[in-house]
Amino acid sequence: MKTIPGEEVYMDNNATTKVAPEVVEAMMPYLTDYYGNPSSMHIFGGQVGEAMKKARLQVADLLGAEPEEITFTSCGTESDSTAVLSALQSFPEKRHIITTRVEHPAIKTLCENLETLTGHKHRVTGLKVGPDGMLDMNDYAEALSDDTAIVSVMWANNETGVLFPVEEMARMAKERGILFHTDAVQAVGKIPINLKESAIDFLAISGHKLHAPKGVGVLYIRRGTPFVPFLAGGHQEKGRRGGTENVASIVGMGKACELAAAKMEEENTRVKALRDKLEEGLLSKIPRSILNGHKTERLPNTTNISFEFVEGESILLHMNEYNICASSGSACTSGSLEPSHVLRAMGVPFTAAHGSIRFSLSVYNTEEEVDFVLEKIPQIIDSLRQMSPFWTNEEVAAK
Amino acid sequence: MWEYTDVVQEHFLKPRNVGEVENPSGIGDVGSLACGDALKLTIRVDDNDTIVEAKFKTFGCASAIASSSALTEMIKGMKVSEAEKITNEDIADFLGGLPKEKMHCSVMGREALEAAIADYRGITLPMAEGQIVCECFGVTDLEIIRTVKESNLRTIEEITNFTKAGGGCGKCEEKLQNILDETLGAVKEISEAVKQPQRMTTLQKIKKIEEVLEREIKPGLRQDGGDIELIDVDGDTVLVSMRGACTSCAKSQTTVKEFVEKKLRELVLDTLTVEETQ
């Protein structure tokens, strides 16, 4: 079963995004005519380095950073691993890591492995979140210790869109001489970021979450931060990341960052309004539906709603019939048997977590699409509830 | 994305027999909201012990809904005594197969059917009386042992795929391994007991064959004026010679195959073949 490209109602932008046409256009010459290696001595290769220089500047501008603080990688996961492992190697005498219980697997699995695979050489504190997905800053203050090598806290949660106060947390870490890394894969391009004003030492970005292609990432490394490379090899990226550069994608990443900066206002006005319309519409039209995560401390594009008494995979597969794309925190969609670790950490009951759907919008979504989704989802939920042994019509009457 | 067969998709998108049978003869209620899937099966059985109506209500993923729909289609019009032989593998086969991680959906179908039949007959299922092994999903040892045997499971991962046990906190992993080892050990012992005669020496074989010939076969042949003699045993090939009336009997070949070989296979070794020397 395949769908026709262009006909999808794509509301799964926290999973991946459409590559912007302007980005494709900027990349094309580096996939065709300009195939040289930027490390070569000849002008043919060397001139490609100019394009990378521009891309580095474009990324730095979006982040409020300096170009030399930008290192290109292959993906967000590589950037995350590089930052955490670098900090541990820079301070081999320190063995404590602070993170949260709702991190993306790129950090979550890395930390679990550091704890267990190294024979418990490292100790990991996973900060709890409340029912709204927010952290308790007192817990954080108490967790910081002289043994802490690095704090790694995501800027925005991929499932709920909840924002963590990473700038404040980075300042608190800095006061104790502790390095601070943030997985900002979901935040960059959606909310304004100015790293010059912050105490953040490392920041990870993924290209495909902001309309650049898959297979390119960025690690921001604050000037003066001790650094040990993850991929040893050639002198590329000033020796910080070996391996011949993915030139076309890096150029695409630069262009995507430039576009994101230009569309930042639209993201936080028009896209946010669409998200709000979708969210309010679903919550009012569908009884026994619950918003997951803090209502205001949140990305402008994300909403995560639980529909009680129905299961997420079934909802998604019915949405498929209308070509509507979204995600679920249900157990059945992942192949595991337990629902999303994020929703469980928030204490969302299993009964609601199994029926959670995440809609994540982008600047390419339209009001017509939101209206279409608002027409179809209530029908889908209703037909599945008619099939559910836990749903009785009294439930509706009670509402 | 899961790779669901066309049959699964068909039964998921257009499920058959959704709802509840009025005044049901039996109700099977399994699973829970917390587990992520649940199925309520209601059946009506007529005076001839035939299931004339079956309906379901299911909370769960596409394969849970498709398995429930398939189950109701399979059992409608079936005798209860036939329906109770349906296994989870039968349900999965009806659907053209299920992803291995989703096999527990077919197990849920089989459990609901059993519960509905037990309810119809007014008996309590022994499965529910087992010891809870997996606390996350409330799976008992009896359920696990049964599924291990029925579906030939060999690893803890397979147990989780089929029963969900061990798919939560994972604390029961050691218990699951013990159950697996014990169950497989028991299965092995049984199959070894069955195989015992396979390791007979030729001498043992000859002795046993002669015994059976004397006791079970010769008396019958002698009544008709015939007889049989063992000539040789070469591996699993038994050479015999027909005597008396049998030598001139046109049916002696049939006698050798239909009567002698069948008896020897049944009573000595099921791999034996009997041949007549001229």
Image (cartoon, coloured by chain):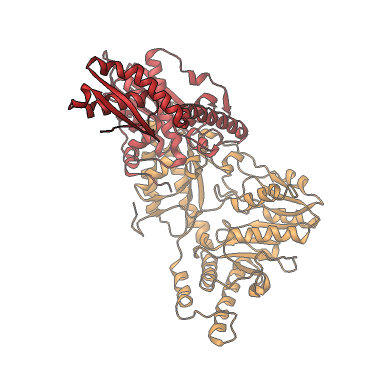
How many numbered discs sit on the rendered protein?
0
Query: Does A126 appear above or below B183?
Result: below
Q: Residue at x 35, y 18 (%)?
A: B214
Is A41 in front, or is A101?
A: A41
Above or below residue A84? Residue B19 is above
Q: Position of residue A221 (x, y in %)?
A: 68, 65
Rendered location of residue A243, percent (x, y): 60, 71
Question: Which quadrant of the rendered structure holds the C terminus of chain A?
Answer: top left
Look at the picture and state if A316 lies above or below B213: below
Q: Residue A119, can we see it?
A: yes
Q: Quadrant of residue B231?
A: top left
Q: Place residue A225 in its image quadrant.
A: bottom right
Q: Is residue A140 left or right of residue A354?
A: right
Give the side of residue B73 with respect to residue A50, left or right. left
Q: What residue do we see at 55% from left, 78% from top?
A: A51
Q: Position of residue B59 (x, y in %)?
A: 43, 32
In terms of depth relative to the viewer, which is nearer, A203 or B275? Answer: B275
What residue appears at the point 31 percent right and 27 percent down from the top-left corner? B261
Q: Position of residue B129 (x, y in %)?
A: 52, 18
Colour used to depict chain B in the structure image: red
Outermost residue, bottom side: A43
Q: Is residue B136 left or right of residue B98?
A: right
- Return the residue nearer the eye: A34 or A179: A34
Residue B124 sits in quarter? top left
Left or right: where A2 falls relative to A84: left
Q: Nearer the viewer, residue A98 or A259?
A: A98
> Does residue B80 show up?
no
Q: Is residue A60 above or below residue B83?
A: below
Which chain wears orange? A
